[in-house]
Image (tube, helix red, strand yellow):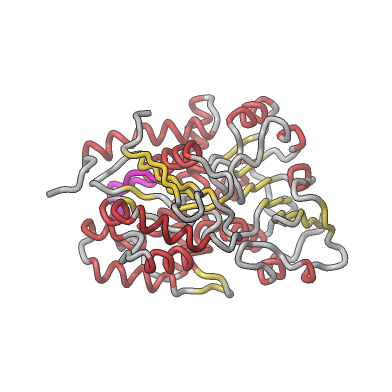
């Protein structure tokens, strides 16, 4: 893959903390990718995520759709989001990167940050919107912005629609893989690492589809129950960072170490929290035959090679968690209405088609799902660039 269009490191003059921005590629002069905040975030991590965004955008290319995929980008800040200084660092980062956001980088929430927090910090940094670079590509900017605002105002059973669509896509990825092997939903056991935006929504959709959530992990530890956890009670007991209030647990629910989710007796593992969660050392503890990457880059390549060698299937992040990003653009460009039914229906159809295509390609080529996803993206990128170019039309 070619060198990124832009790669920079920023130093906060107040705290000395570092921030990063990588724009992997522009399409029509614009790139898309969220902003994460976590301790230990690196430029290499952000670069990998930006490349992944280029692929996610390409994988959702529909020549008949109003939404035309953008280029890929990512931002990152090396800071604990729970740190009292974190909000100030976020505002100063956005102020420093404001020229890029105004010109060609559209961004939003990612690991460690909520969209409400990003929007508040962006306003303080003087930005009109974190997606304002895409406005010149819209047929009717006012109507498009209203659609997105209307969609963000929707709640479903106490959770915002914007928080649910990504988990809907992850759940649909799981269900598609089960359907291809004829595995019944009832009796299929799932362990989820992370009960934040993505993990919590995934757990809800899978539980409502009839699967049994036997374990969830947060920063405090792993909560498990072989008979199944009360997912809705756990979701209602979360704080802003996805940590569950232990007073909501039932007597039969057990608490163990934060990494115990790896070895839980489950059929499906859903890492939905941090990157690099599964490495060559701990992958041997996994007995689940299917890993579905809801987080970005949770399985290290060396670990995935070892897992594949012993028959474990890994569904890659570039497909599995791509629904959130696509939903923003489906809504903004007008492919879907700003309501729950349209959002979930379109997400389910699109994710099922994409996962099925990826798994069929993997079978045909005799490769892993990740290699198949990369091959599909590689096929589509030249088509998109030939049709739309890298730069904004004059």
The answer to whether residue 262 is visible is yes
- Residue 72 counted in the magenta span: yes
**What residue appears at the point 28 percent right and 49 percent down from the top-left corner?**
30
**What residue appears at the point 51 percent right and 74 percent down from the top-left corner?**
155
**What residue appears at the point 41 percent right and 35 percent down from the top-left corner?**
376
Query: In this picture, is 145 found above or below 302?
Result: below
Query: In the rendering, at what x and y percent does residue 161 appear?
Result: 49, 68
* Furthest residue in direction left, as rendered: 394
Query: In the rendering, at what x and y percent does residue 342 appear?
Result: 42, 66
* Furthest residue in direction right, as rendered: 251
The answer to whether residue 59 is visible is no
Query: In the rendering, at what x and y percent does residue 79 appear?
Result: 55, 52
Q: Range of the magenta residues?
A: 59-73
| Quarter of image, res 283 | top right
Q: Please tell me which residue lies in front, 47 or 330.
A: 47
Q: Please tell me which residue lies in front, 207 or 278.
A: 278
The N terminus: image quadrant: top left
**What residue appears at the point 51 percent right and 31 percent down from the top-left corner?**
362
């Amino acid at each position: 893959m070619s060198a990124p269009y832009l790669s920079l490191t920023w130093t906060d003059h107040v705290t000395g903390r570092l921030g990063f921005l990588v724009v992997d590629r522009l399409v029509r002069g614009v790139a898309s990718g969220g902003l994460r905040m976590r301790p230990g975030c690196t430029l290499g991590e952000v670069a990998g995520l930006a490349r992944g965004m280029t692929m996610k955008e390409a994988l959702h290319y529909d020549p008949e759709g109003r939404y035309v995929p953008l280029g890929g980008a990512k931002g990152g800040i090396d800071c604990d989001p729970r740190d009292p200084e974190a909000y100030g660092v976020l505002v100063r980062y956005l102020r420093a990167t404001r020229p890029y956001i105004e010109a060609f980088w559209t961004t939003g929430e990612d690991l460690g940050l909520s969209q409400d927090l990003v929007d508040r910090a962006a306003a303080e940094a003087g930005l009109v919107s974190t997606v304002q670079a895409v406005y010149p590509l819209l047929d009717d900017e006012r109507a498009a912005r209203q659609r997105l605002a209307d969609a963000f105002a929707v709640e479903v059973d106490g959770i915002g629609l914007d928080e649910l669509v990504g988990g809907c896509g992850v759940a649909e990825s799981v269900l598609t893989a089960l359907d291809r092997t004829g595995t019944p939903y009832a009796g299929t056991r799932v362990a989820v690492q992370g009960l934040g935006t993505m993990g919590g929504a995934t757990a809800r959709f899978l539980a409502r589809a009839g699967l049994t959530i036997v374990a969830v992990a947060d920063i405090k530890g792993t909560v498990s129950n072989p008979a199944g956890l009360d997912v809705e009670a756990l979701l209602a007991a979360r704080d802003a960072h996805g940590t569950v209030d232990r007073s909501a647990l039932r007597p039969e629910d057990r608490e163990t170490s934060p990494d115990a989710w790896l070895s839980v007796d489950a059929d499906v593992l859903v890492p939905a929290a941090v990157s690099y969660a599964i490495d060559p050392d701990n992958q041997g503890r996994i007995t689940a035959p299917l890993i579905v990457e809801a987080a970005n880059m949770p399985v290290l390549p060396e670990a995935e090679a070892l897992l594949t060698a012993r028959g474990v299937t890994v569904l890659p992040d570039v497909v599995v968690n791509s629904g959130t990003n696509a939903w923003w653009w489906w809504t903004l460009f007008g492919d879907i209405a700003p309501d729950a039914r349209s959002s979930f229906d379109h997400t389910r159809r699109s994710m099922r088609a994409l996962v099925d295509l990826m798994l069929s390609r993997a079978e045909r080529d005799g490769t892993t799902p990740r290699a198949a996803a990369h091959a599909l993206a590689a096929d589509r990128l030249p088509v998109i660039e030939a049709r739309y170019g890298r730069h904004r039309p004059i």
